[in-house]
Structure formats: structure tokens, C-alpha cells
Amino acid sequence: MNTEKIFEGPGQSSMETYVIEIVIILIIAFMLGYFFCVLIKKSQKNRIKQLKKENQELKNKLSLNKVGQTKDGGL
């Protein structure tokens, strides 16, 4: 196996090759990070909508219970 000694220099490849490889790795990492961020935000938005709907339903039930209790308490 041909291994390069990183402390002694770039070895057989030029420094430009290493820079290009690092840039490509960083671009791919950025694209993956952006893609996963978009997926997470989309799922979180859906979850927020679901929780708002559930919260409104619970508020409606609570207000109906309070109205029912005041009618029963007045008799």
C-alpha cells in the first residue's frame, strides 16, 4: 500500500490536488447539511401545525366544560 507521510509534504500529488479535494469535501458536506436542515425544518413545520390544531381543540373543550359547569352551578 502506498501511504504518504503527511508531516514530510504532499508526496506524489501536488498541493493543488489536495486543495481541490478539500474544497470538494467541504462543498459536499455543505450540501448534505443544507439538505438535512431543509428536511428537519419541513417536519418541524408540520409538527407545529399539528400541535396548534390540537391546542385549539383542547381550548374549545375547556371552554365548553367551563360553560357547562356554570350552567350546572347556577341551578
Image (spheres, rainbow, N blue to C red):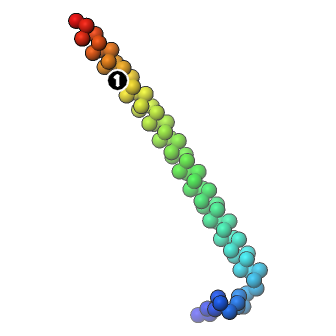
Picture residue at 32% right of the left edge, 18% below the top: 66
Mark 1 lies on a secondary structure that is helix
Tell me if 1 is positioned left or right of 65 in this view: right
Q: Label 1 belongs to which residue? A: 62
Q: Quadrant of residue 13?
A: bottom right
Closer to the camera in the image, 14 or 65: 65
Tell me if 2 is positioned left or right of 67 in this view: right
Q: Residues within 10 Å of mark 1 (few under 14, many from 20)?
A: few
Tell me if 27 is positioned left or right of 42 in this view: right
Picture residue at 75% right of the left edge, 83% below the top: 15
Q: What amino acid is found at the position of numbered circle 1 in the picture?
A: Leu
Q: Please state the horizontal and vertical placement of residue 62, each as a whole percent of the image.
A: 34, 23
Q: Give the quarter of the figure containing the C terminus.
A: top left
Q: Please state the horizontal and vertical placement of residue 40, each as a whole percent of the image.
A: 53, 51
**For residue 11, above or below residue 71:** below
Q: Quadrant of residue 71?
A: top left
Closer to the camera in the image, 8 or 16: 8
